[in-house]
Amino acid sequence: MSPPIRVFITGASSGIGAALAAVYAQRGAQVALLGRRREALQALADSLPGQHRIYVLDVRDRPALHAAAADFLAQGDVDVVIASAGISVGTSTEDHDDFVVFESILSTNLNATVSTFEPFIASMKKRGQGRLVGVASVAAVRGLPGIGAYSASKAAVKSYCESLRVELSVSGVKVVTLAPGFIRTPMTDGNPYKMPFLMPVERFAQQAVRAIDDGVSYIVLPWQMRWVARLLALIPNRLYDRLAVGRQRKPRQVR
């Protein structure tokens, strides 16, 4: 009987991270649950079958993130690493106070993805297998008004994961980029605009885990948003600008 796979997930307190953890736990995996809210992580761990590890930290704290990774690695090989921690709030470059919000979003969405992967690459290369999973977004395809920091961060995650995928292509380690469309999570609950093809987070997680199993390089979910993303990438700037300019904006962070 083969040992259970071991999965390391950031942003596991809620949303996509928690849903992915639930899918893996149901499949018998041992999961490292990372997030800032101890109560939420403990409630999730208690609801899942099996024994799992909880690490309470902010993913922007690189030493703490690396210490958690080292602790989980000390207990055995890690098969899947998912950097799903993320922030999405409205931002305005015109408002100078929003610069700290830009920094926070980029640090959480992009820099922490790098910090999450760093501790695992050497051991995965040595074994010749493993999955590193980054979470981009359909918002990475075109810059959306009012969420410049989020769009920029997710475009950077997409490009970074592509670079890493090529770097590791002969090692046996697969880099998977998930690009969610609108997924029903606490992050989208406050959106004041229509969200076409809104997908339940549980269904997203099931399909995402299948893509991770298959080592798919890049996937947009739900499938309908793949066609939207392809269309957005093709239309000329003049048309895109006319379509996007009147779009209702995501609320800015209250400070």
Image (cartoon, rainbow, N blue to C red):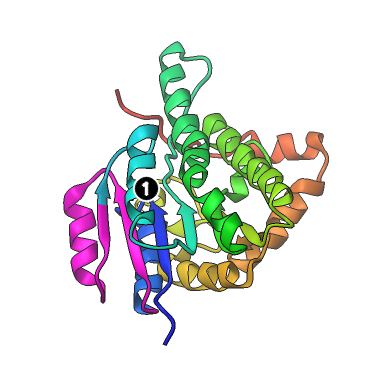
Q: Going 58% across and 37% down the picture, which residue do you hit?
A: 151
Residue 163's image quarter? top right
Q: Going 36% across and 33% down the picture, which residue do you hit?
A: 63
Which residue position is annotated with label 1?
Answer: 70
Residue 194 at x, y percent in the picture? 50, 52
For label 1, count other residues whose C-alpha is less than 10 Å away and answer few (under 14), some (14-19) or many (20+): few
Secondary structure at badge 1 equals helix
Residue 117 at x, y percent in the picture? 51, 46
Report if residue 28 lies within the magenta region. yes
In the rendered image, the quadrant that contains the C terminus is top left
Q: Is residue 105 visible?
A: yes
Report if residue 183 lies within the magenta region. no
Give above or below for 2 relative to 39: below
**Relative side of 17 to 91, left or right:** left
Q: Going 46% across and 18% down the picture, which residue do you hit?
A: 99
In the rendered image, the quadrant that contains the N terminus is bottom left
Give above or below for 160 relative to 182: above
**Relative side of 230 to 104, left or right:** right
Q: Going 41% across and 50% down the picture, which residue do you hit?
A: 188
Q: Amino acid at mark 1?
A: Ala
Q: Residue furthest front?
A: 126
Residue 48 at x, y percent in the picture? 26, 72
Residue 19 at x, y percent in the picture? 38, 65
User: Magenta region: which residues?
Assistant: 27-54
Q: Nearer the viewer, residue 214 or 44?
A: 214
Q: Nearer the viewer, residue 138 or 218?
A: 218
Q: Residue furthest top?
A: 96
